[in-house]
Amino acid sequence: MKRREAQGPRRPRPYAGSRAQAAGQSLVSYTVGALPILNRVIERARIEDFLRDYLPRDLRYKISPVHGILLLIRNYICSREPIYGVGEWASRIASDLLALNPTDIPHLNDDRVGRCLDRLFESDFASIVLAVVVHVIKELKVSLDELHNDSTTVTFSGRYEGAGEQGVEKGKVVHAITWGHNKDHRPDLKQLLYNLTVSADGAVPVHFFTGNGNLTDDQTHRETWDLLRKLKGTADFLYVADSKLATKENMAYIHGEGGRFVTVLPESRGECRDFRKLVTQQAVSWAKLWEKTDENGLVKDVVPIASQPATTIEGYRLIWFHSSRKAELDEISRNDRLQRALRALALLRQKLQSPRTRYRQEARVRDAVEKRLAALGATEWIRVEIKKIEDERFRQLRRGRPGKKTRYRRDVRTRFELEYKIDPVKVAEDALQDGIFPLVTNDRKLQEIEVLHAYKRQPLLEKRFEQLKTDFEVAPVYLKTRRRIEALLCVYFLALLVQALVERELRRAMDKEGIAELPLYPEGRPCRAPTTRRIVDVFENIQRHELTRSDRPSEILVTELSPLQKRVLELLGIPPSTYGH
């Protein structure tokens, strides 16, 4: 069993876990890094306590499942080692920072860590997650007034016997690893659905679940909203999600239960077609709503709002926005798709001209054209004409030198040519619609600017998915059994939670003290929104050295902290004098 190796060269590791000996003395060096910071957050979240409450206890295990799971959480945040490399990584760390005894380290291997995942699966890990999140919300006062939901796919390679169907293992449901709409753009690989909800307050993960690989997002929202209502204790929170929420059934359910939502209306809806038709007729007036500026005061985006009030067919508020930045991106995207479509048609034209072409029927040529244009979303912008050409050939019926009485046979071979051009009228019509997007909500009290900003916070969730797939390298996954996969995804959620809490605590401390930025980037460049990844990198050089001498007591020496490191620790409420000891 193993997890994917990191792509590309790894960052150089500090020389740690080493031992030097001389006459009458020895020096042992260990890595400390950012582990004390993570341990403080893990302790405040009481993750170890809740794992102990739910995980089965068995004295036969050389590595307790509790410590094995915590080891994986720390490893994914700090080092991203594959499961079979966790033991080697832990051997370079001071064992007390991992809540292990020095004698435990040699017993760490992929099989024992895998068994820890088995124990996590056999326990009620959904209740573990719920208990941790409820405590975190109370302890760190995480606001649940606005919650953002979305899903991604976890891609799998390799064989998983019988995994194509949902099943039961150890009395618990295991989901089907199968084909579906792959959000990594890998339709050739199987997948699981990973659904995540975060708070607008610090993008703290508060709920997750896994689903069958072919489960669509529109089927998940009602169950998710019910659980979030139990977590919040009331239906009075704003639920923000993408266009899969905007089905008649989903919106009616949340509205009927007293909930509030903000989502994007799908382009397939009749309201969108009608409004865009008015836009092409230039029958829509716009009123300025908001300008986004950067730290230098330069305008990055201008967002006006359609003056005409609108509602959906169900009677919910429908607000139309226009973003100048989105308009620029839409134009770039359209030009790119047009160029790619023209290249695809040019390549197809070359194939048609080949004497060995396989495109001998007009229907097949037309199908090839439609598939290429549809794949690039350029069908409406390019006009294609297929011309049928007959090439005549005459052959002698018999061998020999031709003469007056020589008879010939007429052979006709049919081939096709393409003529295509961009439709400037259609491109111009679509250009008028660039930058437009519709938001729908059932909250009548929210101002238009509040609806816009609520949806603009959706990328906070996308950032968590990015961290899941880059920092933690969750996919593709190679594991022995499906139950270990389910447990591993729970570990990833806990790692995301710890990472989010570190970021939230540091940023809140900066706001409290009026600090706009910290020089966390290389060359002392300023950072306005510190991430856990940057903090891990900043503390990477910290080591602990244990010096033992025969004629005097042992000494523990820790790498001297830089002013920046001390400042970060002070903001996080960790005494620099105790760090690493």
Image (cartoon, rainbow, N blue to C red):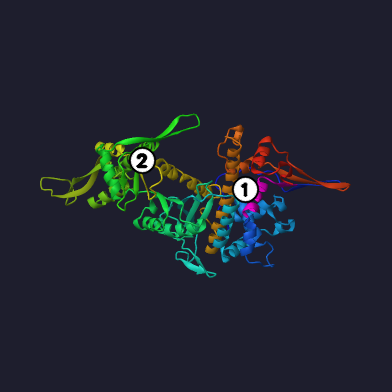
Q: Nearer the viewer, residue 23 or 403?
A: 23
Residue 288 is situated, as x and y percent measured from the top left of the image, at: 36, 34
Q: Quadrant of residue 54?
A: bottom right
Vertical placement of 514 versus 463: above or below?
above
Q: Is residue 302 left or right of residue 82?
A: left
Q: Which mark is residue 78?
A: 1
Vertical placement of 59 versus 321: above or below?
below
- Tell me which amino acid carries mark 1: Cys
- Which residue range is magenta in the image? 29-45
Does residue 204 appear in the picture of this structure?
Answer: yes
Vertical placement of 86 versus 288: above or below?
below
**Residue with the most extreme left position:** 405
Q: Which quadrant is home to the N terminus?
A: bottom right
Dot 2: element: strand
Question: Closer to us: mark 2 or mark 1?
Answer: 2
Q: Which mark is residue 321?
A: 2
Q: Nearer the viewer, residue 1 or 541?
A: 541
**Are there few (<14), some (14-19), or many (20+) residues within 10 Å of tag 2?**
many
Does label 2 or label 1 sit earlier along the sequence? 1
Look at the image and say whether residue 32 sits in the magenta stretch.
Answer: yes
Vertical placement of 567 versus 441: above or below?
above
Q: Nearer the viewer, residue 353 or 278?
A: 278
Q: Nearer the viewer, residue 54 or 188?
A: 54
Q: Is residue 316 left or right of residue 500?
A: left
- Tell me which amino acid carries mark 2: Phe
